[in-house]
């Protein structure tokens, strides 16, 4: 609206300038004595100024109309007051040149304007094409990086699975041997052990359990990669799996002073996720949330978004949240801010969710604590 109004104002004062110039030159012609021939010759050629301006500003039509206006107002003067016949003929030729100059100037102006518009449009098209190419290139780079990351994670998963199996076998033997020694010491079948021996056996047993937990996470990571390769469809009830997972964690949550708030009515939906995988996803997210609240707090669970083919589950805690640097590497394997942590818990969650055709992200707009948004596909009815 603003540009249209500005253009109309510009055309108005241009028209006024052309018309005013013709009127002023014509008045001078009619008021100056015809015997002042030199002055009239100058005025006669002064008509070219408004004619050329009209052609430049309004195109061929504007130039020809300006020439016509000059012809109408000047022709009576050309026919009156001139004794020599050749003078009148000269004036008629001058009038004819008005039309030639006006039409030619307008035509050239129109061609130039069209060429400039075409060049401007071509520039805009090139700019749009460049932006589109830039966007596509960035998308290709992102896809390539994601593919490389997936390949690395797949290889890492296979290696982790093989490594965990190789270590777990001798670890099981060590664990069994230690338990047998402890039982014999307790029953008095072995030589009376010293307090130090009993303490060392307890340490070995405890460290064996810790190593076994680490290997379990490695195996879970490897199984997530296997699920990615398998891609077989599955179905389970979100509410039932959630209830079973909370029952498993109830004692630990209660002892840590952690309360669970869940929207049970809306959680009873079926999703296309394997029951074991969904339980593992929820278990790791709840453990992560509880570790973020060592002094207790609240974990809230509920559906925060729905679409035709998926639901979004929100799991939030009332902890201290996390920094931007931590958030960037949150789902990377082996990244952990906890001492002794493997950094595989959330990575396993991300891989299992991806294997099910869903997605997970950290809600950075959440004001306090941390909230994970897990998108899961709806089960077909």
Image (spheres, rainbow, N blue to C red):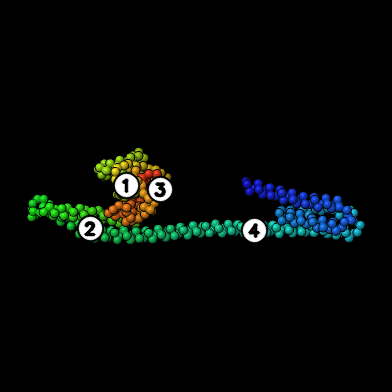
User: Where on the picture, by quarter, is residue 264?
Assistant: top left
Q: CA distance from mark 2 to mark 1?
A: 30 Å
Q: CA distance from mark 4 to mark 1?
A: 64 Å
> Which of pointers 3 and 4 indicates the residue nearer the eye?
3
- The residue sitting at 36% across, 54% down in the picture is 329
The reply to whether residue 305 is visible in this rendering is yes
Task: Tell me residue 117's x, y (percent).
Answer: 63, 57
Task: Tell me residue 66's x, y (percent).
Answer: 77, 53
Q: Which residue is mark 3?
A: 364
Q: Which residue is mark 4?
A: 116
Secondary structure under the numbered disc 3 in the rendered image: loop
Is there a contact, CB below 8 Å, between mark 4 and mark 1? no
253 or 239, which is in the foreground? 253
Q: Which residue is mark 2?
A: 168
Q: Which residue is mark 1?
A: 292
- The residue sitting at 39% across, 51% down in the picture is 324
């Amino acid at each position: 609206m603003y540009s249209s109004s500005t253009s109309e104002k510009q055309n108005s004062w241009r028209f006024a300038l052309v018309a005013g110039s013709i009127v002023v030159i014509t008045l001078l012609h009619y008021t100056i004595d015809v015997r002042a021939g030199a002055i009239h010759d100058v005025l006669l050629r002064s008509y070219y100024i408004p004619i050329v301006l009209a052609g430049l500003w309004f195109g061929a039509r504007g130039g020809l109309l300006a020439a016509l206006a000059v012809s109408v107002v000047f022709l009576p003067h050309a026919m009156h007051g001139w004794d020599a016949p050749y003078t009148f003929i000269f004036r008629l030729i001058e009038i004819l040149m008005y039309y030639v100059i006006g039409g030619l100037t307008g035509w050239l102006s129109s061609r130039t304007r069209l060429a400039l518009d075409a060049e401007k449009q071509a520039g805009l098209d090139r700019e749009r094409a460049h932006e589109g190419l830039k966007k596509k290139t960035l998308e290709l780079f992102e896809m390539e990086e994601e593919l490389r990351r997936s390949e690395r994670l797949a290889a890492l998963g296979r290696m982790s699975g093989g490594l965990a199996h190789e270590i777990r076998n001798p670890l099981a033997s060590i664990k069994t041997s230690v338990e047998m020694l402890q039982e014999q010491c307790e029953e008095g079948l072995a030589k009376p052990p010293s307090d130090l021996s009993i303490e060392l056996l307890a340490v070995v047993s405890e460290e064996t359990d810790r190593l076994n937990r680490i290997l379990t996470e490695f195996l879970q990571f490897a199984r997530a990669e296997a699920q990615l390769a398998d891609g077989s469809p599955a179905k389970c009830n979100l509410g039932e799996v959630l209830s079973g997972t909370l029952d498993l964690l109830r004692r630990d949550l209660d002892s840590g002073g952690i309360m669970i708030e869940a929207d049970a009515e809306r959680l009873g939906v079926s999703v296309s996720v394997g029951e074991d995988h969904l339980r593992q996803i929820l278990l790791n997210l709840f453990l992560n949330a509880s570790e973020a609240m060592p002094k207790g707090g609240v974990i809230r669970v509920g559906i925060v978004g729905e679409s035709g083919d998926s639901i979004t589950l929100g799991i939030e805690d009332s902890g201290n949240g996390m920094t931007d640097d931590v958030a960037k590497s949150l789902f990377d394997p082996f990244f952990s801010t906890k001492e002794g942590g493997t950094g595989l818990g959330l990575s396993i969650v991300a891989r299992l969710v991806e294997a099910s055709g869903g997605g997970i992200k950290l809600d950075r707009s959440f004001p306090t604590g941390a909230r994970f948004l897990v998108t899961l596909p709806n089960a077909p009815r």
